[in-house]
Amino acid sequence: WLNQLNQTPPAGGVAETTVSSSPLGSASATAATSSQSSTSTVGTPDLNPGEPPMPQTYAEVDRMLKTNPLYSQSLPPTSCSIADIDLTRASITQIELHLNTFVDCLMATWRPPVIGAGFELPHPSVTVYARETTSACGALPMENAVYCSADQQIYFARDLIDAFPHNYQTMRFMAEAVLAHEFGHTVQYRTMILISETVLQEDATTKAAENDLSRRLEMQADCFAGLFFNAVAVSTELTNDDRQNITGLYTTLGGTTAYSDDHGTGANRAHWLGQGLMSTTPSSCSTFTAAASSVG
């Protein structure tokens, strides 16, 4: 779950781990693609979002990762209503409707700081799929959830609930905890964080260096999820038990999946989720300046 796709998109697209034709492959960077105006509004998924801004120099890559203008913004309390859902009984249609409604809440929370930082945030859709399928980012496996930057949409496997420990499957906010992480990738993509990380991954000379960068990206998305839940804590009546359950889900799945090398250990993922749960500002999620031990 929460896995990035390492797939090459169709022409003109950009996968999560691919920056089109490596724009920073030489000392003289190629021209960046300008951000296009988005017409999406909360409640209306944008299925044809404009391209995000692109870093033009290595200095900008470094700046976008370490001192991004998003980090100086804040996520104040947001009024959201999140209905309960039993994922073990709900149909695909019901789950898809629930998750797309939940994205409204994510948009209401994240759009102000993203715009305040000088970027745009198109509204992604969520597609729930029942069998292995293909997307703009390539093949989508089961028991997974993915943000695909080739089309800037989110995909959620119907059987992902089966990967949750049995006692977590009917708890509050379990599917939402996954979506909040995937939406964190949406925020990263639109603020040049994901693209900048991809540039450095493509330049990395060892698998260890690639995995270190990937873990920093993934755990920042974990932290962004925590920021979101903290922002809606009052309006959703988020309890201490809810916080512990979300943290437990991250800890358990982070420690048992095959993605620990490039996503991080369960303990470290829980740590960064906790950083967000105790904060109102993305500056608490600066994984790209954190010690290696905290992103292992």
Image: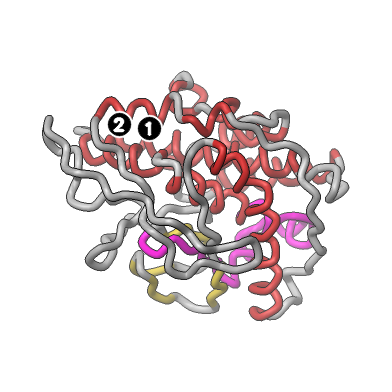
Does residue 155 sit above or below 105 in this rendering?
Answer: below
Q: What residue does disc 1 label? A: 212
Label 1: state its secondary structure. Answer: helix
Please tell me which residue lies in front, 67 or 194. Answer: 67
Quadrant of the rendered structure where residue 148 is? bottom left
Residue at (53% x, 56% y) in the render:
1
Residue at (35% x, 69% y) in the render:
136
Which range is magenta? 150-178
- Amino acid type, residue under disc 1 in the picture: Asp
Q: What residue does disc 2 label? A: 209
Residue 108, percent from left and from top: 68, 52
Residue 99, percent from left and from top: 66, 66
Residue at (85% x, 38% y) in the render:
240
- Does the segment drawn in magenta span residue 66? no
Label 2: state its secondary structure. Answer: helix
Does residue 231 sit above or below 286 in this rendering?
Answer: below
**Residue 93, label in figure:** none
- Does the segment drawn in magenta span residue 175? yes
Residue 215, percent from left and from top: 44, 37
